[in-house]
Amino acid sequence: MNTQLKQPHLSHPPEPLALLAPTTNRVAGASWLDRAAMRVGLWLVLWGSRPVSNAEALARHRHRAFLAQERAQREAEAALATRLWMHGASSDAVHPHPCIRTSDERET
């Protein structure tokens, strides 16, 4: 009896699929839940790898540069006004640089 249960000694290991006999003719497929999960995953991968619009980034950069330029101009005008005030100059004093104007001159 023991001789029937023993497997013959092979020089190489057996193939894993050769040992398993097919029990059914059904081909393994994905269930509807698996297919839905794969489709959602595909949509997320495609959405995550979409190209970024350079026009929006360029517009943001230009707007930030414009705001920084305006802020620098306001700070320069405030520093000039502070220096003029510290030296006792009146508001009618002529500015040393023709590009710098006060808010009163802008309104006219």
Image: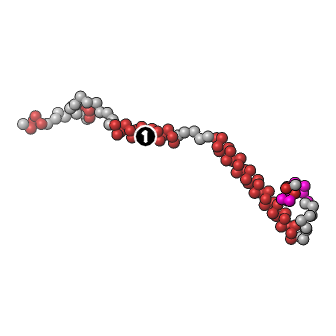
Q: Is residue 105 left or right of residue 65?
A: right
Residues rendered magenta in the picture: 96-104
Find out whether residue 107 is within the magenta segment.
no
Q: Amino acid at mark 1?
A: Val
Asked if 99 appears above or below 32 in the picture, the reply is below
Asked if 73 appears above or below 24 in the picture, the reply is below
Q: Is residue 35 left or right of residue 78?
A: left
Give the dominant element type of the magenta stretch: helix, strand or loop.
Answer: loop
Is residue 68 something that shows in the picture?
A: yes
Is residue 100 something that shows in the picture?
A: no
Q: Is residue 85 left or right of residue 18?
A: right
Spot occupied by residue 40 in the image (x, y as percentages of width and height): 43, 40
- Quadrant in the picture for residue 42: top left
Q: Residue at x 89, y 65 (%)?
A: 91
Find out whether residue 99 is within the magenta segment.
yes
Q: Is residue 43 left or right of residue 60?
A: left
Asked if 40 appears above or below 106 in the picture, the reply is above
Per the image, label 1 sits on a secondary structure element best described as helix
Q: Residue at x 26, y 32 (%)?
A: 17
Spot occupied by residue 58 in the image (x, y as percentages of width and height): 68, 44
The residue that disc 1 covers is 40
Q: Residue at x 25, y 30 (%)?
A: 26
* Residue nearer the viewer, 86 or 4: 86
Quarter the C terminus occupies: bottom right
- Quadrant in the picture for residue 12: top left
